[in-house]
């Protein structure tokens, strides 16, 4: 499985650099930054614009895309913050032994009384 992953990753990098090479060998006036590598693998290096987004999606879909993207970014930030804060430290919760001569207490009986516990 690891070999298949490496092969796929290598293919993606080759396609990326192939597309980049294909665009950079063109004169400046002819560069479109979109096309196909070897006539098969499509690429599009153009920056996204609102006009291009409006051409493909309606207002509700743009709102949904924006919401999902912002939510993803927010949770990525939260997760990163938690990882930085709580990794690489000793466990904060430790078991404390019972005091000598202490006995277990039934909290339900202690709070409600013997007559109310069934």
Image (spheres, grey):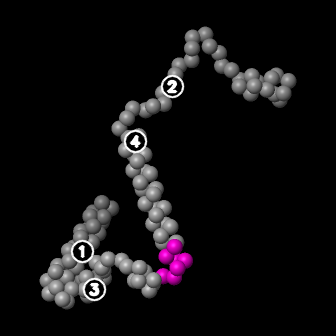
Q: Position of residue 23 (x, y in %)?
A: 19, 82
Q: Which residue is mark 3?
A: 35
**Who is closer to the viewer here, 100 or 52?**
52
Q: Earlier in the sequence, mark 1 or mark 4?
A: 1
Which quarter of the figure is the C terminus placed in? Answer: top right
- Is label 3 in contact with label 2 (beta carbons under 8 Å)? no
Q: Residue at x 45, y 66 (%)?
A: 69
Q: Residue at x 40, y 41 (%)?
A: 85
**Who is closer to the viewer here, 9 or 57?**
57
- Is label 1 in contact with label 3 (beta carbons under 8 Å)? no
13 relative to 38, above or below:
above
Q: CA distance from mark 4 to mark 2?
A: 22 Å
Q: Which residue is mark 4?
A: 85
**Who is closer to the viewer here, 75 or 5?**
75
Report which quarter residue 87 is drawn in.
top left
Observer able to see residue 103: yes
Q: Earlier in the sequence, mark 4 or mark 3?
A: 3
Q: Is residue 103 left or right of residue 77?
A: right
- Is label 2 in contact with label 1 (beta carbons under 8 Å)? no
Farthest right residue in view = 115
Q: CA distance from mark 4 to mark 3?
A: 44 Å
Residue count near mark 4 (Cα–Cα under 10 Å), binned few <14, some 14–19, many ≥20: few
Magenta stretch in the rendered image: 57-63
| Magenta segment includes 91 | no
Q: Earlier in the sequence, mark 1 or mark 3?
A: 1
Q: Earlier in the sequence, mark 2 or mark 1?
A: 1
Question: Dot 1 lies on which element?
Answer: helix
Q: Which residue is mark 1?
A: 16
Question: Dot 4 lies on which element?
Answer: helix
Report which quarter residue 99 is drawn in.
top right
Q: Earlier in the sequence, mark 4 or mark 2?
A: 4
């Amino acid at each position: 499985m690891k070999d298949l992953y490496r092969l796929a990753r290598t293919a993606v990098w080759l396609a990326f650099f192939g597309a980049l090479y294909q665009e950079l060998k063109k004169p400046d006036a002819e560069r479109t930054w979109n096309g196909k590598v070897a006539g098969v693998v499509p690429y599009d290096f153009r920056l996204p614009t609102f006009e291009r987004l409006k051409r493909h999606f309606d207002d509700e879909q743009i709102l949904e895309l924006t919401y999902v993207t912002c939510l993803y970014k927010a949770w990525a930030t939260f997760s990163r913050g938690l990882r930085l804060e709580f990794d690489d430290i000793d466990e904060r919760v430790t078991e404390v032994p019972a005091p000598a001569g202490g006995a277990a207490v039934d909290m339900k009986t202690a709070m409600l009384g013997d007559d109310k516990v069934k």
